[in-house]
Amino acid sequence: MVEGSPGARSGKRPGRFLVPLPAGGFGAGESMIQVRQLAKHYFDLRLGRIEALRGISFDAYAGEIFGLLGANGAGKTTTLRILATLLQPSGGTATVGGYDVVRQPALVRRQIGYVSANTGVYDRMTAREMVEHFGRLYGLEQRVLCRRIDELFERLQMREIAELPGAKMSTGMKQKVSIARALVHDPPVLIFDEATVGLDVVVARSLLQIIGTLRESGKCIVFSTHIMREVERLCDRVGIIHHGRLLALGTLEELKRHYGHEDLEDLFYHLVAESGSGAARHEGELPAPEQASSLARSEAERPCDSV
Amino acid sequence: MRFRLNWRNVWLIWQREVRDQFRDRRMLFLIFVLPLLLYPLMGATFLQLAQFVQETPTTVLVLGRKHLPPEPPLFDLRQRTFHPQWFDRPEDAPLLRVQFLEDTVPVRRLDSRTLEQLVRRRLRTGQVQAALVFSPGGNADSGAEATAPARRFPRPQLLYYSAKRGSQVAHRRLWAVLRNYRTGVVRHYFRQNGLSERLLEPFQLNEQDLADQPLRQAAVWSAVFPFMLLIWGLTGAFYPAIDLCAGEKERGTLETLLCSPARRSEIVWGKLLTVMLFSVLTVVLNLASVALTGAVVVAQVPEAVRGIGPPPPAAVFWVLLALLPVAALFSALCLALAAFARSSKEGQYYLMPLFLVALPLVILPMSPGVELSLGNSLIPVSGIVLLLRAAIEGDYAQAARYVLPVVFVTGVCVWLAVRWAVDQFNRETVLFREGERLQLGLWLRHLLRDRDQTPSVAAALLCAVLILLLKFFLGLSVSLRQASVPVMIVTVQLVAVLLPAGLMTVLFTSSPRKTLLLQLPRPAAVPMAVLLAVVLHPVVVAVAQVVETLYPLSPEMKQAARALLEQVPGGPRRLLLLALLPAVCEELAFRGFILSGLRHMGHRRLAIVLCAVLFGMIHAVVQQAIVAALVGVVLGYITVRSRSLLVPVLFHATHNALSLSHEQLAQLWQRLGGPQWLLRTAAEGELEFTAPVVLVSGLLAAAVLWWWRSQPVEPTPEEELLEALAHQEEPASAPA
């Protein structure tokens, strides 16, 4: 396990800045997540072969929040599901904590905590029961587990809902339970897949604060979103993904400086436009400008989301 | 490192699932409350209904009473019923009322045609439930030898309306009354003529049931219990399975669980044991409820359920013992099917097909004449039912003989079902299936547009189904047209077998060469294929004989098969039609297209076996199908090892040619004066291999197969992946 890699925000790890990305990828040995030429295709009865990922490569390090920014359908969830061993890649490799996601999925799952917008909570279990159940699956001793649950419930302000069954929880409460469940075994890698979708402003802000504090404890956090402000406020490094391709990768400052756009939204529009029609996966899919406008809409829906 | 199951995880998942299910009120109602309410309610309803139906009187319209002799009296004119002496139970007499047409209609003024119409109208409208018309004159059928009274006796005619339930009841009652009346009339004539009535009954039948009461009861329960066991075992497994798989998908919790350190196999085992528990509970509670209701019914109306008592304790024990494998089998099947469903609603659609498959296997052992034998014990589910029946009836010696085959077959089925369920949980296409509606047109277009080098599993299965259907209908149509046998063989092989496989290869694959393995094998593979066919032949013949002993072929079928073969011309044309043509066509279809597609499942051995089973199914006769499926396994194995279709074609052709040449080989052996203890000529000129020959052939075949085992296999990407997963490192070595 690689621990304590300094965050990019501290300036010790320069962000990479690659358009197009090199086929060889990066050579850093201490990264927690290594993704190399990751590809994924699947078949849709109506649309045919869909190239969800077309060979993306990136690294994510301990103590940093790596943001995957892209419109709906860009390939963010597919990437994160592959990292969480839920999907098998069609090509390329991905390792988490040094373990291969295809050949050592059981080991990878011990390294990660996965939270997504869809992550469900069992209706007929209380928050405490659910977190406890997963803690046991991770092999934690009862004494350690109880202490850990108390600690997490305190930290996430979940004491009031500890004995509430899932069916009676609000979306925000459920998301907190999901986070507690993902953190119970203290994994070195945390994967948040559009975790703020469907949350109200207050809960979303609280969630982002929690994620921010997790970085301080040295976790490697991969955070996918289509909301630009979340990226600007939270992420140390950003990968902009569009139509299954990683268009840009680096710290926000590096990206803005390189492309000459001060605004992340302008930068995103610029990259999407530059990727052009060649990036279109299929003729039946939405054209790039529409994707871009969907992003703009999503942004407009969340007027206040500072961390 | 080899994969191992972490039972602690299985236990944790089982605990959670069971707790979750016990908190679900719908499930509790279905599993616990429903059976406890259902049978008492059914029992009460049955008692009410039975009483109602039994006590409903029916009316018979009688015409021509005056033609009847006064003695013995058929009717009780005072009560307007038939005379009680003609009823088996005289107290039933009021249930069959009599209405004389003469009392209501001026019969004398009406002609016979009008009267007939009147009777028919009353029957149709339900005013009466049956009619009895006595015509004057002698009995037309009595003949010259009939006695004078018989000739004089009016001709009765019974009219009823079978489309009405009441009329059916009246008919049954009336028929019993008339039968007794007929005997009474004969007795009366005997008395009149001074003959002894004992002539009517030259002997008295003295019957005695040697089975004691518990065994008689057991016989009744042996029919009821297995049926309930299977139906409730299946139903009890299905709803929890849906909730545990499709329900998890709906609630979005499946992703959470799949991210946990529990392996997919551990998740499946945890869920499987939960489903099993509920299946077992459903059966036990239903049986208990039936037993209780039955006891109450027996106590209330003992005459209605004569001969049935409470189930013997031994029967209950055997049912509980059989419950475990049955519950395991159905739970694994339900779990695999439910894993495929996207929602609980969709999951419920799969219940009916599963019932349709399971029901014939449950009903088969209940057919008269089906007894526990080695052959029947090898049929999944049916074997359990037959074994259970024998055990409940106390026939332990018979049951003990077939315990092993039943346990073996059930064990294999459970293992396969569990493997299938685990496999479903390893497939992202199943777990993350989109909510897209399956449309055949879209799917075919997808196969056409997104074709891979080799066909998909679905395309392979579609091809097999097409071949089965075409072969069935084409064979039927050709034989109905009375075409010659050679024409029939050529048509079936080219149109039913080759055409679908060929068309699908062209349409749905981008590399016919790779799909149909159209490449030359290593030079040594060619003689080894022929050699294997030769040395394996005596073993196959011996297996075929065993199969025929287990499932005997009717003489008519044997005769028909022989007659068909006799119509095929002899010499090289016979070899061409029955050896080479099937070898080429069937191998292109099965070991070519279908096996290539099935290998995308990721399980090489399973693909070979499944392909062999499908290959067996195209053989019309069951006995032939079993042998063909076994040979199909060898064919699939050497195909995978050789990567060339020429190898199975050569094996297949050689095997068929040898089967066709038994007569000639026997003659040759006789001419050469070969010892009879090696090769014998059986009846009808058939060649019979003796035990030493079969044994030596088996050993030689094993040696040749060992050589084949050394040949390299080219794994598909799916096979590589599953192999890698099976050999992944143990999580125990993970950092804490």
Image: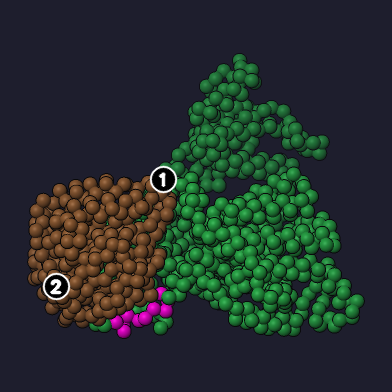
Verify CB contact (< 8 Å) between mark 1 and mark 2: no
Residue to which mark 1 is pinned: B49
**Taking B63 as reference, is B221 above or below it?**
below
Q: Residue at x 14, y 67 (%)?
A: A211
Residue B587, given in percent of the width and then of the height, sits at 65, 63
Is disc 1 surrounded by few (<14), some (14 to 19) or many (20+) residues within 10 Å?
few
Q: Which chain is green?
A: B
Residue type, mark 1 in image? Leu
Q: Nearer the viewer, residue B641 or A254?
A: A254
Q: CA distance from mark 1 to mark 2?
A: 87 Å
The residue marked by circle 2 belongs to what chain? A
Residue at image point 69% right, 46% down: B477
Q: Secondary structure at mark 2?
A: loop
Q: In the image, what residue type sits under mark 2? A: Gly
Residue carrying label 2: A11
Q: Quadrant of the C terminus of chain B?
A: bottom left
Q: Is residue A248 at least partly visible in the picture?
A: yes
Q: Is residue A236 left or right of residue B612?
A: left
Point out residue B724 in the picture as x, y percentages from the top left corner: 43, 75
The label nearer to you, 1 versus 2, is: 2
Q: Please identify the quadrant where the N terminus of chain B is shown.
A: bottom left
B175 over B324 or under it: above or below: above
Q: Name the element at disc 1.
A: helix
Which of the 4 image quarters holds residue B636?
bottom right
Residue at (54, 72) in percent of width and height: B714
Q: Which chain is brown?
A: A
- In depth, the one of B511 and B658 nearer the eye is B511
Q: Which residues are magenta?
A: B725-734
The correct choice, above or below, for A108 with respect to B86 in the image is below
Coordinates of residue B489 in the picture (x, y in percent):
74, 54
How many C-alpha atoms fall within 10 Å of the one at disc 2: few (<14), some, or many (≥20)?
few
